[in-house]
Structures are given as C-alpha cells and as structure tokens.
Image: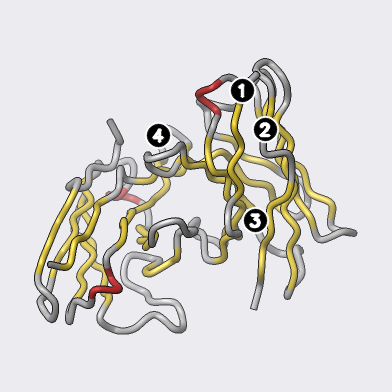
Amino acid sequence: QVQLQESGPGLVKPSETLSLTCTVSGGSINSYYWGWIRQPPGKGLEWIGYVYYTGDTNYSPSLKSRVTISVDTSKNQFSLKLTSVTAADTAVYFCARRPNPPYFDFWGQGTLVTVSS
Amino acid sequence: QSVLTQPPSVSAAPGQKVTISCSGSSSNIGSNYVSWYQQLPGTAPKLLIHDNDKRPSGIPDRFSGSKSATSATLGITGLQTGDEADYYCGTWDTSLSVLLFGGGTKLTVL
C-alpha cells in the first residue's frame, strides 16, 4: 500500500517561499505522476500541479508563475516550492499520486501551512 | 465560482439513496474522465470513483458513478451515518489545461 507524508514548516511569513516535501513509501516513485493539491480553511480543493518521475511538470495556470515542483527519485520524494506567498496561500497542502488518466488515488494526510508575520 | 458545478448540500435518511451531480462543459466533463472523492471531516480526500464509473479496490458497490454528455453523477445507496462527508468531483479541462475540482457537496444523513 502506497503511503505519502508531507513535511515542512507550518508557518511562513508573507513574501517568503513555502517549501514542502512529500515522502513516498510502500512503492516506487517511478512510473507515476505526483501532485500537490491545497484546500484553504473551510473551502474546496485546488490543484497546484504535478511532476512526472522524469522531472516533467505541469502547473495550474493561476499559480504557474510562483510554483516549482521537483522530484528526487533517489529519496522517493517530491517537493513543492511556492514563492511570494500571501495570506491567500494559507491552506492545508496535500500531496497525492496521479495515475493516467488524471485522478488522485493515494493521498497524504495533509499539512496546514499558515502565512502570517 | 467553480467551473464544475455541484449542489452545495444534499440530505437523505439512513438506508435511502442519494445522487450528487457535477455539471461542466464540453472542454472538461464532455471530453475527459471524471473522478469522485469523499472527504470526511478533518481528513484527506479519498478516491471513490475514477474513469467515470470505476471503483478502486475496497470501495463498496453502494457507491456508483455515471457520466452523460457534460454532466456526471455520484450515487450512494443504503446511506449510513458514516457517509456524512464532503464529496468532490474532478476532471481535466482541455481548454484551460487545468485539473479541476467541483466546489464540493456536503452530504447530511438525517
């Protein structure tokens, strides 16, 4: 059974960079896409982007200018960086596996990131 | 305002059946597969349906999915109090090049 676990700071200051890592266990990161989704408090799900194990990426147009998703196959991890954060980026951030065609079958438990000074 | 439209809430009694709709357009639901997710309070979403109507291993057959033209439907039969959750549809939008989620539907089992 594939398991995912997000890790990273729970508090980020405005204008700084949000950085999260997702560690995959119970299976190889190879041969799949891996994505990030976020959920502001009390609101719905928003897709951020995904990375293929080869490093190819696809980002949401609304976040593309601020997002970088990368993969480290040697560590079975992939990462999210979101620059120039504001309070609007406060959310629970989930990592998930994305098969093809695109849906998300295995999810991390999520991590709350608060943007505040 | 989500591109995929779901009713904000639905309710039904235990043992009854409920359906949740997800309305889109030709560039998303009309030309791509739909998935459905259940999110219990305080937990991560859980995949219920993928590829319009396929259930992952471990999902009971009380949950079903269907698609017609630019709309999709999640059906839940034999409702249980444990089914109270938020439900989201999802699909790719070919025109926007974005993976979309519906706004979510809160299911109350009365």
Label 4: chain?
B
Q: Residue at x 47, y 42 (%)?
A: A39
Q: Are marks 1 and 4 on the same chain?
A: no
Residue B96 position within the rendered picture, expressed as x and y whole percent measured from the top left: 42, 32
Query: For mark 2, does the 10 Å Cα neighbourhood hold few (<14), some (14 to 19), or many (20 or more) residues?
Result: some
Residue B18 position by quadrant = bottom left
Q: Depth check: give the residue in front, B26 or B83.
A: B83
Query: For mark 4, does the 10 Å Cα neighbourhood hold few (<14), some (14 to 19), or many (20 or more) residues?
Result: few
Q: Earlier in the sequence, mark 3 or mark 1?
A: 3
Q: Is residue A50 left or right of residue A87?
A: right
Q: Earlier in the sequence, mark 1 or mark 2?
A: 2
* Element at label 4: loop
Q: Which residue has dot 4 on it?
A: B95
Name the disc covering residue A11, or none. 2
Q: Earlier in the sequence, mark 3 or mark 2?
A: 2
Disc 1 versus disc 4: distance between alpha carbons?
A: 35 Å
Disc 4 versus disc 2: distance between alpha carbons?
A: 35 Å
Residue A4 position by quadrant = bottom right
In the rendered structure, which amino acid carries the disc numbered 2? Leu
In the rendered structure, which amino acid carries the disc numbered 4? Ser
Disc 3 versus disc 2: distance between alpha carbons?
A: 27 Å
Q: Are marks 1 and 2 on the same chain?
A: yes
In the rendered structure, which amino acid carries the disc numbered 1? Ser
Q: Which residue has dot 3 on it?
A: A33
Residue B99 position within the rendered picture, expressed as x and y whole percent measured from the top left: 46, 44
Label 2: chain?
A
Q: Which residue has dot 1 on it?
A: A116
